[in-house]
Image (spheres, grey):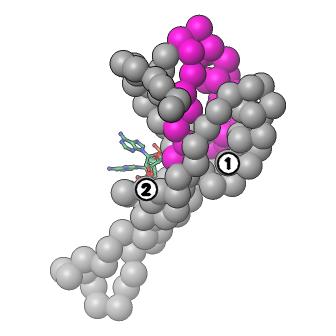
Amino acid sequence: MKLLITIVQDQDVQQLLEELTEQGFSATKLASTGGFLRVGNTTLFIGVEDDKTNEVLDIIKNTCQKRDQYHASPVSPFGRGGVLPRPTKIAVGGATVFMVAVERFEKI
Ligand code: 2BA
C-alpha cells in the first residue's frame, strides 16, 4: 500500500474528492498553507493499494490545474523609498504528490 500525500489548490479539491470517491478511493482532507506564497491550499491523504496508484495519479492529473498567482516580494530596506516591487507571476499546480510506502495499515 502507498500513502499519496497530495497538495492541491483549494479550487480543485471538490472535483478531485468527487472523482476519487466515485472511483472507490478514500481520502482525508486537511487545510494547509504553502510555505512560499503563504496562501491556503489543501493536503489530501490518499491510502491506495500499489496496483491502483497510477489510477489515482491519473485522476489527480486530469483534475488539478496549473494556475498563475502573483507573489509580491518583501520590500527591501535598501530599495527606493515608497516604491513597491512589481509582483512576480508564479505558476502553481496542478499538484504536488509525495508517494510513501505504508508499512502497515489497520482499521480498528
Ligand atoms: P507554496 O510553497 O506556497 O508554493 C507555491 C508556488 O511557488 C510553487 O508551486 C512554485 O511554483 C513556487 N515556489 C515554491 N517555492 C519556491 C521557491 N523557493 N522559489 C521560487 N518559487 C517557489 P508548486 O510547486 O505547484 O507548489 C504548490 C504547493 O505545494 C506549495 O505552495 C507547497 O505548499 C507544496 N509543495 C511544493 N513542493 C513542496 C515540497 N518540496 N515540500 C513540501 N511542500 C511542497
First reached walking from the N terminus: tag 1 or tag 2: 1
Mark 1: is the Cβ under 8 angstroms from ligand 1?
no
Residue 47 percent across, percent down from the top left: 54, 28
Helix, strand or loop status at disc 2? loop
Residue 34, labelled with which disc? 2
Q: Is residue 16 left or right of residue 54?
A: right
Q: Nearer the viewer, residue 74 or 31?
A: 31
Mark 2: is the Cβ under 8 angstroms from ligand 1?
yes
Residue 13, labelled with which disc? 1
Q: Give the residue drawn at x 42%, y 64%.
A: 38
Q: Type of residue at label 2?
A: Gly
Residue 6 percent across, percent down from the top left: 52, 38
Q: Give the residue drawn at x 75%, y 34%.
A: 21
Residue 88, magenta (yes or no): no
Q: Nearer the viewer, residue 3 or 84?
A: 3
Q: Where does the magenta region start and end?
A: 43-66
Q: Type of residue at label 1?
A: Val
Residue located farthest toward the bottom when viewing the structure as drawn: 82
Q: Nearer the viewer, residue 97 or 4?
A: 4
Q: Are marks 1 and 2 in contact (CB under 8 Å)?
A: no
Q: Is residue 99 left or right of residue 49?
A: left
Q: Nearer the viewer, mark 1 or mark 2?
A: 1
